[in-house]
Amino acid sequence: MILKLETERLYLRPFKKEDATFLYELNSDEEVMRYTGDFAFEDIEAAKKFAMDYVSNPQGQFALFKMGRMAVIRKEDNAFLGWSGLKKNEKEGYVDIGYRFMKKYWGKGYATESGLEVLRHAFQDHKIEYLVAHVHELNYGSQIVAQKLGMQLNHRFLWDDREPARFYKITASNYFKTFK
């Protein structure tokens, strides 16, 4: 599937097998993974399989919904910074926005910049009524990004019935009032 989003400094594109080394590195950093609930890849081959399956699986996000998590690439040097994107949760009946960046790129505005383009994509291209973000209670950096994206705290909950988390939400009407 061809899906490419763009901002002033960034490209967002589907994962490629060449991203495996970076995905492996990203998910191997304990500090990056601390509040995600995800696990590190066993090896680079597992990361490569994930990247290829994520894009080509006929039952995956890209094939079914024309959306998904996407590699975030810096234009000036083609550096892989992390990922950002949408995920449709059919069982719960909503679409969430997520983002994960390598620690060396934290604090440079990349999560917010890519997130704003993902919001635009959700509300303009997909005509989604609202987006949510699940953020661990102690993940202050991601909470700040969610707030910069115009998301508001909707409620607190236990993530996987064990981890304290915040449920942020933004509606299409609030997005268009705030950003257009």
Image (cartoon, rainbow, N blue to C red):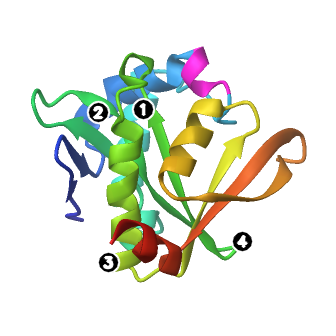
Residue receiving disc 1:
47
- Residue located 21% across and 51% down the image: 7
Q: Secondary structure at mark 2?
A: helix
- For the C terminus, the image quarter is bottom left
Of 171 and 103, the residue lying toward us: 171
Give the vertical position of 93 relative to 32 (above or below): below
The numbered mark at residue 19 is 2
| For marks 2 and 3 on the same chain, the one whose residue lies earlier in the sequence | 2
Q: At x 33% / y 23%, what residue is drawn?
A: 21
Foreground mark, 4 or 1, reads 4
Q: Position of residue 173 (x, y in %)?
A: 50, 81
Comparing labels 1 and 3, the label whose residue is closer to the camera: 3
Q: Mark 4 packing: few (<14 Cα in 10 Å), some, or many (20+)?
A: few
The picture places residue 74, in percent across and down from the top left corner, at: 20, 34
Tell me the element at label 3.
helix
Q: Is residue 82 above or below residue 71?
A: above
Instruction: Find the distance from the CA under tag 1 to the CA under tag 3.
Output: 29 Å
User: In the image, what residue type sits under mark 2?
Assistant: Asp
Q: Residues within 10 Å of mark 1 (few under 14, many from 20)?
A: many
